[in-house]
Image (cartoon, rainbow, N blue to C red):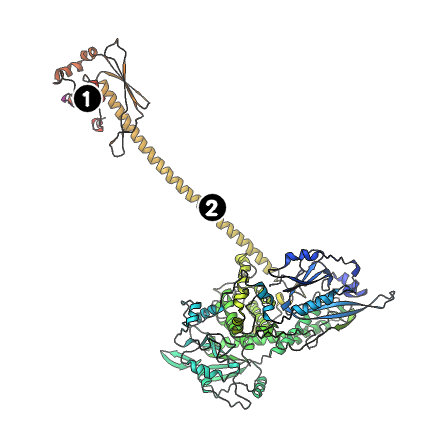
Amino acid sequence: MAAPRPRRSASVRDPSDGRKRLDGAGSWDALEWTKIPVTRSISHVGLEFLLEAERVVEEGHGVVLVNTDEAGTLFVTNFRLLFLSDGTRNIVSLGTIPLATIERFNKMVVKVQSAPRQTDKSSSRRLLLIIGKDMRIIVFGFRPQTKQRRVIFDALSRCTKPARIWDLYAFTCGPSKFSNPNPKVRLLNEYFRLLGKGFHCASMRMIEDGSFTLSNDLLRISDTNSNYTTCQSYPFALIVPKNISDEEVIQASTFRARCRIPVVSWCHPGTGAVLARSSQPLVGLMMNMRSNADEKLVAALCTQLVNGKSSRRKLYIADARPRKNALANGAMGGGSESSSNYFQSEIVFFGIDNIHAMRESFARLRDYLDTHGAASSDGMSSFLRHGGWTWGGRNLSSMSASVSTLGDSGWLIHVQSVLAGSAWIAARVALESASVLVHCSDGWDRTSQLVSLANLMLDPYYRTFTGFQALVEKDWLAFGHPFSDRVGMPSISGTSFELTRQSSTGSFSSSPMRQSSGSLTPQASNSSHAQTNYSPIFLQWVDCVSQLLRMYPFAFEFSSTFLVDFLDCVLSCRFGNFLCNSEKERLQCGVYEACGCLWAYLADVRSSEGSSHAHYNLFYDPLKHNGRVLPPAAALAPTLWPQFHLRWACPSESQAGELEAESRHMAIKFSELQKAKEAAEKKAKEYSMAMETLNAELRNEKQVSSSAMNLAKRASKESAAIKRAIQSLGCRVNFTSSVNCSFDFESNPTETPQKYMHSPPRRNSDGTMGPEDKSDLSVSITVVSEDVVSSSPLGRVCETLCPLRNGGCRWPDAACAQLGSQFVGLKANFDAFDRLSIYDGYFQSE
């Protein structure tokens, strides 16, 4: 689990306080133990801080974290050592460490000189020293005359060295929501990308039926190790030269240590130059053993196609060891190649030390930081040690001495050697188009460092989140870096391991109490030297990646914070990705099905804040470094990695710095403004669409209104025509706004007027009449008597001209309707008038 950033807010002392303490009883021991509250119920409060499937094994109350003089409760769970502050009820990150991250622990008694007036001239304090693989040294103090230290020590002894790998927390927790898809598929997809076959997509079915053996002009994927019979520490699929058969691959494996034959790790997409890896050849003490199959396989790595014809390119064989070490290995059957046996080859020795030298160097660096940090494991600032004159005071030679001590640790020199060797390899491939074969002794420590770092320099894909995962899974996990041995965890064999509980040999003392505080007596050392294979090889490689990130801040998608969290996850063994020593062992243990996935966890952490998360590099510009990065020798001057090396000893100085913090703050603000802008644009788009809808509706309303106006005008014309026509019949017409048409008439002046109701039909859009539609026009017609009609001139004309006068009027079908104007007033037959239908054609002249 990624450890949170250290917070020493509760008890960080100022210099004056520290000086006063030194004048008294010395260091943290002046604390009055009787005033420490012992809260037995605090364990219930701590339950909310437990992870999934995490359970409390033992707990100690009234414990003091000496580094910060903070009192609290110490829990031992099945996953970590957890320190909960009594004052804040929060987890103290400095005092909380995963069990797998503990390198060693020890019980100690410190005797401190008491004040002169006290009868007892000396008093002892019982301590528990915890040394972590992540650069921290923690000291816990326990109340005297209690068995709490023994209880915590015994619990740590049981939980930090489980007898079986299945007892680890990663198996207890299970995959949860961070499931781990089979990495074989991801490895094949990376192989397809390297061969230029990225359009193929690997699947478990492809692995089961063996159809993954694709090839290009020079290379092919071989399934000769599909059952791990050729090499148990290699992956199931290997990239080998196309002209080398599987039988020759098997023959060549007998000539290499642990059968780790030369195979391709990366190939240049343009020139075809390859970067290959292997273990040392078994040439023997006299350096005279040879293998035709091995020589043919190595020669095939140098093949190139020029105008369709095969030719040879130069081959460099990079031996990561010092030359004397390679010769010494000859006595055990190993050794190094002879350039006379490998055509057009050149042998180069890099002089990188072995895992034991790296382990001791790392221990010296950790002790140096604890001694000269702002607040070390004895709770004292380095500015105040030895009366305050050892650092930055009168004796300035002490300052230069401490700096030289940093150099004496050798860690930065080792980091520089790995960086320089990787840059040299990358330059040969990129600038000379030469092929390079890299190996050390077994081909899984220094070889993995050099090859993967050279890949990172050559291929920008590996400098992204996805590519970094593919690189680690390919060159570290698939090719069998023994993580269980190097991290110090049980392997598939099921044998338990021992944690050494005393300091590594070197010029430093790992005691938490310096000479000014009193004498220290180690207890219960129970030391064991069985853990000789532990070494921070992978940690050193991540340190090298951080150095490249510092030199090329625009070339990496991920940040230094991501590297720290990633490394913490690896060291904690919370997930199953880095358990066991090889791909074969992880399959046998069922790691992929039973444990969670580190990559899925980190991706889930990043998804909470998107690109503004601290794992993203603010300055990443893929266009600026879209190719190789080759640091010159003058730039390969490494420094301490502040975010990792200084985070416990110098927490203030370990931060990324004000500039990066301010840049990240500005990036978050910019992201918020960007989101606000997108929301505003979305809202504006919605408003625009609403306006367009309203405009469309308005246009439709205008069209309807225009149609209604036309219909109204037409109706007005019809009404006027009807009125004239009826008036021509001698009727009085009254139009009203009602549903029906009413006719009021009287046959003579003395009779009561009669009323007829008529509803004229409405016209359809095509000009036809709608029989059931009602008109809004009402017509009131009053007909005068026959005498009045007959006495009118028009009536007399009608009587004279109408041939049907005696049989009834047939207007408007009669010819009389055509006389004079369009209509001639006629004496109307009211039955005929009821059937009156007037068409638009009658009113064209109006």
Asked whether residue 378 appears in the rendered view, the answer is no
Count every numbered label the image shows and give the total.
2
Give percent across and percent down for residue 445.
56, 76
Q: Are marks 1 and 2 in contact (CB under 8 Å)?
A: no
Q: Earlier in the sequence, mark 1 or mark 2?
A: 2
Residue 537 is covered by the magenta coloring: no
Separation (CA) of disc 1 from disc 2: 65 Å
Q: Residues within 10 Å of mark 1 (few under 14, many from 20)?
A: some
Does residue 814 show up magenta in the picture?
Answer: yes
Image quadrant holding the N terminus, namely bottom right
Q: Residue 90: x, y in percent?
A: 67, 57
Q: What residue did someone put label 1 on?
A: 823
Q: Relative to the observer, which residue lies in front, 46 or 462?
A: 46
Q: Which residue is mark 2?
A: 683
Q: What amino acid does circle 2 point to?
A: Lys
Q: Is residue 526 above or below residue 623?
A: below
Span colored in magenta? 810-817
Q: Position of residue 74 (x, y in %)?
A: 70, 62
